[in-house]
Amino acid sequence: MQRFFLALFLITAISFSSTSQNIQSPDKFLGYEIGTQFSRHHQVIDYFKSVAKALPNQVKMEKYGETYERRPLYLTYISSEENIKNLESIRENNLKNAGLVNGNATNPEIAIVWLSYNVHGNEASSTEAAMLTLYKLLTEKQDWLKNTLVIIDPCINPDGRDRYVNWFNETASQPYDIDQQASEHNEPWPGGRPNHYLFDLNRDWAWASQIESASRLKAYNKWMPHIHVDFHEQGINEPYYFAPAAEPFHEIISDFQRDFQTEIGQNHAKYFDKEGWLFFTRERFDLFYPSYGDTYPTYMGAIGMTYEQGGHGRAGLGILNDEGHVLTLVERLTHHTTTGLSTIEIASKNAKRLNDEFGKFFDNSDLKYKSYVLSGNTDKIESLKNLLSKHDIKFENASDRKVSGYNYSTGKQGSLNTDSNTLVVHTNQPKGKMVKVLFEPNAKLTDSLTYDITAWSMPYAYGLDAVASTSKISSNSTVEGKMPTMLPDAYGYVSDWNSMKDAKFLAALLKADFRVRFTEKPFSSNSKTFDRGSLIITKGDNAQFENMQTKLNELTKKHNKTLSVINSGFSQTTPDIGSPDIKLINKQKIAVLSGEGTSSLSYGAIWHFFEQQLKYPITSINTDNLSRTNLDKYNILIMPSGYYGRILNENNMKDLKDWVRSGGKVIAIDAALRSFAGKEGFGLKYKKKEEDENLESNKLTPYAERERQYTNNMITGAIFKSKIDNTHPMAFGYENDYFTLKLGNAAYSLLDRGYNVGHIADTKVFSGFVGQNALNNLDNTLVFGEERMGSGSFIYMVDNPLFRSFWENGKLFLVNSIFFVNNNAFEL
C-alpha cells in the first residue's frame, strides 16, 4: 500500500512538473517581469493563446465579440482534462439546475467561477493579474480544477485599457516617477476608464447599450456562473476592498448569497493577514443598482462581488501615496492574484453547496407581483422586448381584458385595459427575480447612503402604461409584427411621430436627401387624424428623384415603417399641406462640444446616440478650440453636461449669443445649464432655496453623523412625474405627463420669458431616494425649456434624457429640439 501511494505521488509530481515545463510564465513570455511594465491588450491575449496551445486539454479559448475599435474579446475556460472534455455537458447541466433549459440536472457538483478583469481601462493592474492567476492556477493549484471550472475574461474593456496603456507608455519617465504631480499620474481628458464611446461599462450590464456589454451577456447567460468577480481599482490612498458588500442589499438577495460572501471574505483575510496587507469590507460598495458587474450576476443567482485594489489610473507603475507608501503595480497585481485564487479555492471547497444553493435561487414562488403588464406605443414595446431578449427573459402578449394592480402612472391601485399588443412579463420564469428588479415600481431601499442611482423601473424608462399584478395574468405567445406594404403612387405620405424608430426613419430620409415636412398642428386626411410632429413626404417636394416612390419604399422596408397615404394637399381638417403650420425640416448641421470641461460620460452618450442609434452626423468641437471655431458652419451646438467657466469667458459668451441671435440653437444638458443660469441676458434662474427650519440644529450635527445628515440635500436618481406642454415642438410625440429621472438636486425656476415645456408640478416621488430638503425645493421647477434670443434659441434640458442610454422615453426630446424647435432658424 505504501508503495502505491509513493507511485501515485510520483505520478502527480511528474504531472505538475510537466505542466510547469509546458507553460511559460508571464515574465518569460512577455520578456519583462510582470508588473514592471504595462502589457498591451494584444500581448495579454497572445499569452493566453500560448497557454491554451501548450495545454489544449485543460485550457480552451473562445472569442465572444469585438470592441468598437475592433479589438477581440475572449473568454478562457480552465479546468481539469475531464471537465474540459465535458464542457458542454457541464454547461447544460448547470442551466438545467436553474430551470433555464428543460430536463433534470444530473448531480451538479462542478463549481463555475467567472473572473472579469479591467472593466475600467485605467484600472489596469487586474489584466496583469489575470495572466499571473492563469499561470499559478495551472502550475500550483491543479487540485482545485477537479471540481471547478474557471472562466476568465482577461479584459472587458480593451479599448479603454489600450488608451490608458499607450498614453502611459508615451508619457512616463524611465525609471517611473513616484511624485503625484508628475505627468504620468495625471491622465488627460477623457482618460482610459471608459470604452470607445466613453461609456462606463460597469454601469451597462443591465442596459447592454454597448457592443462589449451585449456580446458579454450572450456568453454570460449561456453559462450562468455560480460566482462572478469584477476586479477594480480605487484611489491611491485606499488599501484593498473585498466582500462582504455594504448595505443596501436588494431584498431579493438570498441569505446564502449574503453569508457566502462573508465566507469568501474571511478566506481572503487569511491570506492578507499572513502578509500584513491592509484591507476593508462592508463599506462603500453596496448591492443595489442592477447594472454593475457584481449586482447583475447576483440577481442572476451568482455570488457577485467587486474587488477594489488601491491605485487606479493615477498610480502608474509606482506612486508615493499620502501615507508615505510607494504603491507599485507589482503590489497591486499581487493582491488581485491572491483574491482571485482565494475565490477559486473556496469555490472548490464548496462546489456541491454552490450548485445546490444556485438551484434554489430560481424558485420565485414568493415574489409579490406575478405579472407586469405594459401597454402603449408599439415601437416602445418592441424596444423593451429587444432589451429583455438580451437577458433571455421571456415575455408574452395579453388577451383583451381589464387588469387590476399597482398602476405606475398614478402610484396607487388601479387598472389597465389590455389588448393583443399589450406586453406581459411574468415572474414565474427562472429569471423572475431579475424581472422583479427591472420592473418593480419602487425598489426597497434599506440605506439612503448608496453608491449609485436608486430608481430605474422599466415602465417609466420606456414611457409605457403599466400595472403590476399580484395575480398571474393570462397571456399568449407574442405575435410577430407585419412588414410594411409597398406604397402606391400618391400625392404624399405621412409617418407618425412617437418613438425613436420614427426619429431614425427621419434621419435616414434626410441623409438620403428627401425633403420632409412636419406639422405643428393636428390635421386630418383620408379619414385619419395626424398629430403634431407627424412627418409628411410629398411627391412635389421630392421631384429631384426619378423614382421617388421606389426610393421611399426601400427606406420603409429597411426601417420596417408603415406610412399613411394622402391623395391631396387639401386636408379634411386644416392645416392643408401647404400651410405655414406644416414646415420643411432643415438638414441640420450639428456641433457637439468635447474635451476639458465637458463630462466625458455625457459627451460619450451624445456621440453614441448620434452614431449608433440615430445614425445622423455630428461634428465634435474641442473646447480648447471653441474661440477659433466658425460656428456659422453649424445650425446647432450641443453642450454636454460639464463646467464651462474656463471656456465661456466674456468674449466667447458674446460670440455665442451673437450666433444664437442670428438663428443658431444651443442645447444645454444638465450641469451645462450653470453656464447661463443667473447670467446677464438670460431668463434661466436658480430656484431660491427655502430656509431650512432645522438650520441652527444642523450646525450642531455630530461629526460622525454629518454624511448621513447631508442626504437630506441629495437626490440619488429618483423618478418624478412632470407636466408636459405637448403643443410645443420640443414635446411632439409625448402625452401630457412624462416620468423624468432626476439625477441631482439642481433646481431652476420656471422661465419668465420663454417656454416651460416640462416642469415638476407635484413633488410626489414615484421611485428612488430624495432627501427632504431637496424635495422641498423642486416644486414648480423646470425640466425642459426654450428661451428665444433674437432668431435663435437656448434649449434647456435640466434632466439628461441620454443618461447611460437606458432612459428610452426621453430621447425624442433631444431629436425634437434639433429638428422641430424654432424651425424658422437659419438653414445652411
Image: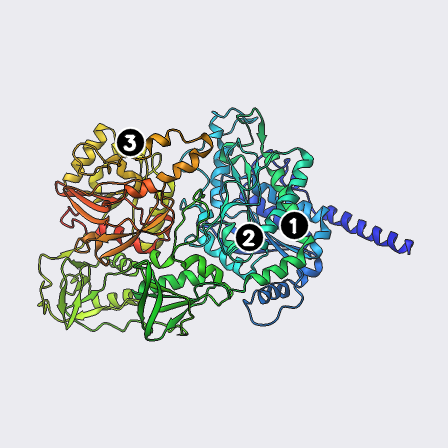
Q: Which mark is residue 344?
A: 1
Image coords of residue 688 (percent x, y): 24, 36
Tell me the CA gap for discs 1 and 3: 51 Å
Q: Relative to 656, is 575 on the left or the right?
A: left
Toward which corner of the image does residue 733 lie, by quadrant? bottom left
Element type where label 2 sits in the image: strand
Within 10 Å of disc 1 (Cα), the crowding (few <14, some 14-19, many 20+) is many
Q: Position of residue 703 (x, y in %)?
A: 45, 30
790 lies left or right of 264: left
Judge left or right: residue 732 versus residue 166.
left
Q: Amino acid at mark 1?
A: Ile
- In the rendered image of this protein, does residue 168 appear above or below residue 575? above
Comparing 600 with 662, the one in front is: 600
**In which image quadrant can residue 241 be found?**
top right
Q: CA distance from mark 1 to mark 2?
A: 20 Å
Q: Position of residue 228 (x, y in %)?
A: 57, 52
Where is residue 503 drawn, in percent x and y?
27, 57
Identified by mark 3, the residue type is: Ile
Q: Are marks 1 and 2 in contact (CB under 8 Å)?
A: no
Mark 1 / mark 2, whichever is N-terminal? 2
Q: Nearer the viewer, mark 1 or mark 2?
A: 1
Name the residue rendered at 67%, 54% in the picture. 350
Q: Which residue is mark 3?
A: 647
Mark toward the viewer: 3 or 2 = 3
Q: Which mark is residue 74?
A: 2
Crowding near the residue tagged with mark 3, few <14, some 14–19, many ≥20 C-alpha atoms within 10 Å? some
Above or below, 691 relative to 92: above
| Residue 163 in view | yes
Density class for disc 2 (Cα within 10 Å; few <14, some 14-19, many ≥20) is many
Indicate how the structure is coloured in the image.
rainbow
Identity of the amino acid at label 2?
Answer: Tyr
Q: Is residue 399 left or right of residue 240?
A: left
